[in-house]
Amino acid sequence: MAPPRRPPPVPPRPRPTKADLLAATEKGVPDLIAPGLRLLLCGINPGLYSAWAGHHFARPGNRFWPALFASGFTPRLLRPEEEHELLQAGCGITNLVERATLAADELTSEELLAGARNFEQKIHRYRPRVVAILGVTAYRVAFAAAGAKTGLQAGEVGGADVWVLPNPSGLNAHFTPKTLARLFRALRLHVESTR
């Protein structure tokens, strides 16, 4: 049996300048979405680094891609620029708010509430089986669910089960990579059970 194929070496990514990051506040990151996905992952909003790079969860140190791999969603650790490969696995990515910020706590309650309405419209349009919001505090505000905790939520949105997961940003030190992998794994098992 041949050893598993390794991805090609990754050339060093250029680092953005401060001016590059400030200019990224005018950019967003396009949705990675298609009809009938088994899972639609929803970040809070793009960070400046992700907006600059044009890919979801692109900042070095973000634990999103390692958590997807460690939980079994992907067969190998994907780089942000390989995000399109998620569609082949029936997964997509969007954001509650399109506006890029240095940190998610710069968003207003009004932006999060409007983002929830837009997100619900995407669910009705694209019909994913399960959606996962990556940010407990943002979910509580956007969906007026003050007591929400991580995991499966009561009720559905547009026929989709709703999960809440922690924000995988490296700034969110409350959740270790091991804990994130465990929570993402629970989501994966639920998604697989909805077939």
Image (cartoon, rainbow, N blue to C red):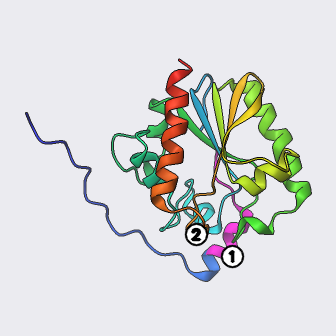
- Locate residue 61, reporting x and y percent: 48, 68
- Give the camera-side residue of 158 and 172: 172
Residue 8 in the magenta stretch? The answer is no
User: Could you classify mark 1 by the number of other residues whose Cα lies within 10 Å: few (under 14), some (14-19), or many (20 or more)?
Assistant: some
Residue 19 at x, y = what percent? 64, 80
User: Mark 2 belongs to which amino acid?
Assistant: Ala
Left or right? Give the position of 104 relative to 107: left
**Residue at 84% across, 49% down:** 142
Residue 56 visible in the snapshot: yes
Where disc 1 sits, the SS reads helix
For residue 186, side relative to residue 159 (left or right): left
Query: Residue at (25%, 59%) from the top-left corner?
Result: 9
The circle on residue 22 is: 1
Image quarter in which the N terminus is found = top left
Q: Which residue is painted at 63% across and 74% down in the image?
A: 21
Q: Which mark is residue 173?
A: 2
